[in-house]
C-alpha cells in the first residue's frame, strides 16, 4: 500500500517538476512545501512508518529515502537551471556596447567680462584686497558729491549720466563705492569693487551698460610709488610678464595728483596693430592719490591717512584680452560669438 503510494508520489511529482517552465519557476517552491513541508505528502508518509510491520520497515524506509532524494535532486536541478537562466537574462539586459559612440555634451564658456572679473579678483585678493559691492541705483551724493564733484561741476559733463530724479541716478562710476566704504570702514583697508556702470554713450567702444573695477587703499604712508608698483604687478599678471606700462599725468576731481595708465598692446607687443590703432599702447585706467578733500568728506582724517585709488574699464580689458573689435559683441548674447570664448 505505502509502497504503491510512494511510487505514485514519485512519478507524479517528478513529472510535474519536469513540465515547469522558466516563467512558472515559483511553482518549485510550492512543490517543496507540498512534499517536504510540515504537512507535506512525504512527511505524512514518513510518519506512517509507525504502522508498518517491523519486517517491512527497512524496505519502506529505503524507498522513502529514495523518493526524497529523487525529488530533491530533480528540484535542485531545475532550480539551478532557472538560476543560470536568470543570470543570463540579467547579463543580457545590462549589456554595455563599448563600441557605441559617446554622447557629446556641449560645454559652455565663461563670459569674457566675468572671466576678467574673476582674474582681477584672483590677483587682487592675493595682494590683500577685500571684494565689496555697491548699489547700481545710486544717489547723486555718493556718485558725485562725495567724490568731490559738486553740482554744476564741469567734470560731470564727461559722464553723461542717467538720472532717475534730481538725486537718484544709475551710477556712472564704481568710484561711488569709495565714499560708502570710507564711511563704514576703519583705516587701514584695501578694497576692490567690480560692477556695472551706466552712461548715455554708444559706439564701437562704448555701451550704455559697461563694467568697472574700482580699487581703494587707505593707510598712513601710502605713496604714488606704492600705486605704481601695485598697478605694474596687476597688469603684468593680467596681460603677461613682458607687458610694459606707461603712466601719464591726468586729472580727476577725486585724486591729486591723478594719472592715466596705458599698457603695451598684448596683440602686437608694442609694434602697432589695428587693436591699438598703430600706437602700440592701450589706455586702460585712471588712478591717483586720493584727494584729501574726498577723505574729509567721508570722515577720514586727512592729516593722518592717505590713500590711492584706481578705476579699470573691464569691458575694454576683456576686449583687449580676447581681441574683440566691438564692445556690442559682449552684450549681444550671440551664441556664435560666445562659442569662440571656450
Ligand atoms: N571713475 C573714473 C571714471 O569712471 C575712473 C577712475 C579714475 C577711478 C581715477 C579712480 C581714480 O578711482 O582714482 O572715469
Image (cartoon, grey):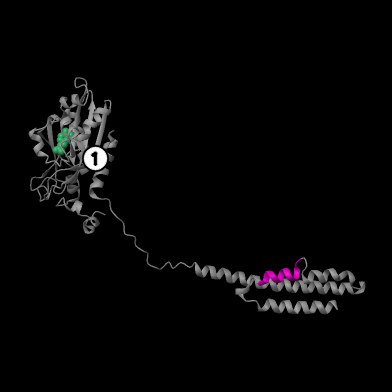
Q: Which residue is mark 1?
A: 194
Looking at the rendered image, the quarter that the N terminus falls into is bottom right
Magenta part of the protein: which range? 27-37
Q: Is residue 162 above or below residue 333?
A: above
Q: Residue at x 76, y 77 (%)?
A: 10
Q: Which residue extends farthest front? A: 165
Nearest the viewer among 52 and 341 is: 52
Find residue 273 and report its horizontal and vertical position in percent: 10, 50
Find residue 114 and report its horizontal and vertical position in percent: 25, 46
Find residue 58 and report its horizontal and vertical position in percent: 87, 72
Find residue 129 and report its horizontal and vertical position in percent: 27, 34
Q: Is residue 175 above or below residue 334?
A: above
Q: Is residue 240 visible?
A: no
Pointer 1 residue Cβ closer than 8 Å to ligand 1: no
* Helix, strand or loop status at disc 1: strand
Q: Which SS does the magenta portion mostly show?
A: helix
Q: Which quadrant would residue 189 be assigned to in this image?
A: top left
Looking at the rendered image, the quarter that the C terminus falls into is bottom left
Q: Which quadrant would residue 227 be assigned to in this image?
A: top left
- Left or right: 165 with respect to 83? left
Q: Is residue 197 visible?
A: yes
Image quarter for ligand 1? top left
Nearest the viewer among 292 and 166 is: 166
Q: Is residue 198 above or below residue 304?
A: below
Q: Is residue 34 above or below residue 116?
A: below
Residue 88 sits inside the magenta stretch: no
Amino acid at each position: 500500500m505505502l509502497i504503491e503510494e510512494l511510487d505514485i508520489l514519485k512519478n507524479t511529482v517528478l513529472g510535474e517538476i519536469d513540465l515547469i517552465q522558466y516563467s512558472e519557476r515559483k511553482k518549485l517552491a510550492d512543490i517543496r512545501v507540498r512534499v517536504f513541508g510540515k504537512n507535506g505528502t512525504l512527511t505524512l508518509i514518513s510518519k506512517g512508518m509507525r504502522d508498518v510491520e517491523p519486517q517491512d520497515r527497512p524496505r519502506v524506509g529505503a524507498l522513502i529515502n529514495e523518493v526524497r532524494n529523487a525529488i530533491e535532486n530533480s528540484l535542485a536541478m531545475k532550480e539551478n537551471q532557472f538560476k543560470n537562466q536568470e543570470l543570463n537574462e540579467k547579463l543580457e539586459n545590462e549589456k554595455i556596447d563599448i563600441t557605441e559612440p559617446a554622447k557629446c555634451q556641449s560645454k559652455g564658456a565663461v563670459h569674457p567680462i566675468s572671466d576678467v572679473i574673476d582674474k582681477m579678483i584672483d590677483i587682487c585678493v592675493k595682494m590683500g584686497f577685500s571684494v565689496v559691492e555697491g548699489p547700481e541705483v545710486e544717489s547723486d551724493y555718493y556718485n558725485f558729491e562725495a567724490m568731490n564733484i559738486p553740482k554744476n561741476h564741469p567734470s560731470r559733463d564727461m559722464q553723461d549720466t542717467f538720472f532717475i530724479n534730481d538725486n537718484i541716478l544709475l551710477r556712472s562710476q564704481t568710484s561711488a563705492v569709495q565714499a560708502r566704504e570710507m564711511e563704514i570702514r576703519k583705516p587701514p583697508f584695501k578694497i576692490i569693487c567690480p560692477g556695472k556702470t551706466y552712461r548715455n554713450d554708444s559706439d564701437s567702444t562704448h555701451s550704455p551698460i559697461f563694467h568697472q573695477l574700482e580699487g581703494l587703499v587707505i593707510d598712513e604712508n601710502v605713496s604714488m610709488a606704492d600705486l605704481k608698483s601695485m598697478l605694474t604687478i596687476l597688469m603684468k599678471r593680467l596681460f603677461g610678464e613682458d607687458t610694459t606700462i606707461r603712466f601719464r599725468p591726468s586729472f580727476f576731481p577725486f585724486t591729486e595728483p591723478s594719472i592715466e595708465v596705458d599698457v603695451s598692446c598684448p596683440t602686437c607687443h608694442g609694434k602697432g596693430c589695428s587693436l591699438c590703432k598703430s600706437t602700440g599702447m592701450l589706455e586702460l585706467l585712471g588712478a591717483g592719490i586720493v584727494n584729501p578733500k574726498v577723505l574729509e568728506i567721508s570722515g577720514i582724517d586727512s592729516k593722518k591717512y592717505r590713500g590711492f585709488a584706481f578705476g579699470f574699464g573691464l569691458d575694454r580689458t576683456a576686449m583687449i584680452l580676447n581681441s574683440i573689435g566691438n564692445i556690442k559683441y559682449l552684450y549681444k548674447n550671440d551664441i556664435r560669438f560666445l562659442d569662440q570664448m571656450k
